[in-house]
Image (cartoon, rainbow, N blue to C red):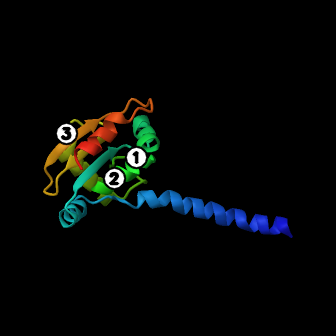
Amino acid sequence: MKYFILLFMIPLLATAQADLNNVDDSKWLTNYDSAISRAKKQDKNVLVYFTGSDWCPPCKMLKTDLFETHEFQELSRNYILLYIDVPRNKDLISEKQMVHNKELLTKLNKKKVFPLLTVLDSKGNELDQLSGYSMNGVIDSHLKLLENNK
């Protein structure tokens, strides 16, 4: 009987863990106008993250090394978060979202570097940015960017 209960609980626990993993992602907006509007209402700056989620190894490592840390979670409360993905696999985002993201790429990431963190004020003016990631686990410069622009 206890094995039956255990077998029943495993899928529930796995589902709960999956839901916890998605909680952090829900803070990231994907629409520039929505992010700017929210920034104005909340008197915050916008942190824009340019990534190539399916082809950029430094982007993938930055997600783990920075975005999943307690320090980032604390500092990110001072920002409206905007996630701009430019994947090679066109099935990962809608065509409309890809057009939106590529427009922002030409506007805010002219050199097309990945990953790129850009801080905007609530009017959309660029305040600061940091490009690249060496994939060595050292995120001090990324945290400093957030600390200096909150």
Which structural element holds mark 1? Answer: helix
Give how far apart the Cα atoms at labels 3 and 2 are. Answer: 25 Å
CA neighbours of label 1 inside 10 A, class few (<14), some (14 to 19), many (20+):
few
Which structural element holds mark 2? Answer: helix
Choose between 15 and 31: the one closer to the eye. 15
In which quadrant of the rendered view does residue 51 lie? Answer: top left
Question: What's the residue type where badge 3 is placed?
Answer: Lys
Reading the image, the residue beneath label 3 is 110
Tell me, yes or no, if residue 34 can be seen here: yes
Residue 2 appears left or right of 118:
right
Q: Earlier in the sequence, mark 2 or mark 1?
A: 1
User: Residue 71: which numbered mark, if any?
Assistant: 1
Which quadrant does the N terminus fall into?
bottom right
CA neighbours of label 3 inside 10 A, class few (<14), some (14 to 19), many (20+):
few
Q: Earlier in the sequence, mark 1 or mark 3?
A: 1
Question: What's the residue type where badge 2 is placed?
Answer: Ser
Residue at the image point whose x is 43% and y is 54% from the top: 91
Residue 38 appears left or right of 125:
right
**From the viewer's perspective, is the residue at label 1 or at label 3 nearer?**
1
**From the viewer's perspective, is the residue at label 3 or at label 2 nearer?**
2
Q: Measured from the top left, where is residue 125 in percent x and y?
A: 13, 50
Residue at the image point whose x is 22% and y is 35% from the top: 111
User: Residue 148: which numbered mark, if any?
Assistant: none
Tell me, yes or no, if residue 115 can be seen here: no
Reading the image, the residue beneath label 2 is 76
Q: Earlier in the sequence, mark 3 or mark 2?
A: 2
Q: Measured from the top left, where is residue 80 in percent x and y?
A: 28, 57
**From the viewer's perspective, is the residue at label 2 or at label 1 nearer?**
1
Q: Measured from the top left, where is residue 130 in percent x and y?
A: 26, 37
Residue at the image point whose x is 22% and y is 58% from the top: 44
